């Protein structure tokens, strides 16, 4: 694991966005996956800027979603789809055919999982995946005690995730399940970018980096991944001792 610590959220976001731009410039057909949530907002801003300034060309890239709240679609502010479309896809010159996003409103969720699995395998696995970390160490909706052998799947949400969910939505929503890429999908990617900022993430960052690998902390399971880059701001890194 390579750890990159920048002074603040903005500098961290810029550094991570530059990494992604370089990656795509080296491999224009990149299959890219970027988490929803708050953490990637700065990266998305810089990726849009790079696209506007012709520093990167997304025209040959494909995009797959990481996760979604079951029962929510783009209409709900704070859903993963709304976040990624409003902050990224709608702001860069790409077509809908390049994007495969979980439909949290799908009536047949198993079929939805198979559809996303197939998109990934048809495109030869994910090249670059950008993962936020939940307060409980979840990545995507791979919650504590996650099985390691899963591809796309539906999960019951952890109580911590339900509590934290209020920050995303205009009003509290009774979210119970998530649909997510699995640990196996993530482990088959070429390169992983983990991102975390703010003091409130300092404990989970420390557990991820310095704690034992354990299914109770899903982010810790990525520790030995060969090409893992962990981008942090100083606040999130402040409890690291090694
Ligand atoms: C959310 C999402 C993830 C996200 C993680 C961290 O619940 N399911 O996609 O990466 O938790 O979110 P945030 O960046 O808002 O802290």
Image (tube, rainbow, N blue to C red):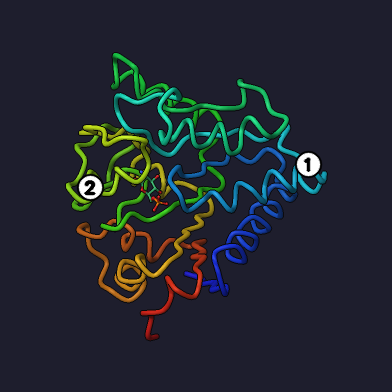
Q: Is residue 39 above or below residue 162?
A: below
User: Tag 1, which secondary structure?
Assistant: helix
The residue at the far front in this view is 171
Q: Could you tell me which residue is drawn at 61 percent across and 21 percent down? A: 96
Give coordinates of residue 178: x percent, y percent. 28, 34
Residue beneath disc 2: 163
The residue at the far top in this view is 107
Q: Is residue 183 above or below residue 106?
A: below
User: Mark 1 Cα within 10 Å, few/some/many (few <14, many 20+)?
Assistant: some
Q: Is residue 36 above or below residue 93?
A: below
Q: Could you tell me which residue is drawn at 51 percent across and 70 percent down? A: 233
112 vs 162, left or right, is right
Give coordinates of residue 140: x percent, y percent. 36, 45
Q: CA distance from mark 1 to mark 2?
A: 37 Å
Give coordinates of residue 62: x percent, y percent. 61, 33
Give coordinates of residue 75: x percent, y percent. 44, 22
User: Tag 2, which secondary structure?
Assistant: helix
The residue at the far right in this view is 54
- Mark 2 sits near ligand 1, with its Cβ under 8 Å away: no
190 vs 57, left or right, is left
* Circle number at residue 98: none
Q: Quadrant where the C terminus lies? A: bottom left
Residue beneath disc 1: 52
Chain-order first, disc 1 or disc 2? 1
């Amino acid at each position: 694991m390579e750890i990159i610590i920048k002074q603040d959220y903005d500098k961290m976001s810029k550094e991570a966005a530059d990494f992604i731009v370089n990656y795509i410039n080296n491999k224009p057909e990149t299959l890219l996956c970027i988490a929803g949530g708050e953490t990637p907002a700065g990266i998305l801003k810089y990726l849009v800027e790079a696209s506007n300034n012709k520093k990167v060309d997304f025209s040959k890239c494909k995009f797959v979603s990481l996760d979604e709240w079951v029962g929510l679609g783009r209409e709900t502010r704070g859903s993963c789809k709304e976040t990624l479309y409003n902050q990224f896809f709608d702001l860069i010159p790409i077509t809908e055919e390049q994007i495969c996003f979980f439909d949290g409103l799908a009536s047949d969720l198993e079929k939805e999982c198979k559809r996303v699995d197939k998109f990934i395998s048809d495109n030869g696995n994910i090249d670059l995946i950008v993962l936020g970390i939940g307060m409980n160490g979840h990545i995507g909706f791979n919650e504590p005690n996650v099985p390691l052998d899963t591809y796309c799947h539906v999960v019951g949400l952890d109580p911590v995730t339900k509590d934290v969910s209020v920050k995303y939505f205009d009003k509290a929503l009774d979210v119970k399940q998530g649909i997510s890429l699995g640990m196996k999908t993530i482990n088959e990617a070429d390169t992983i970018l983990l991102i975390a900022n703010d003091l409130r993430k300092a404990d989970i960052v420390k557990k991820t980096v310095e704690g034992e690998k354990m299914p109770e902390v899903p982010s810790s399971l990525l520790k030995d991944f060969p090409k893992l880059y962990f981008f942090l701001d100083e606040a999130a890194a402040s409890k690291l001792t090694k």
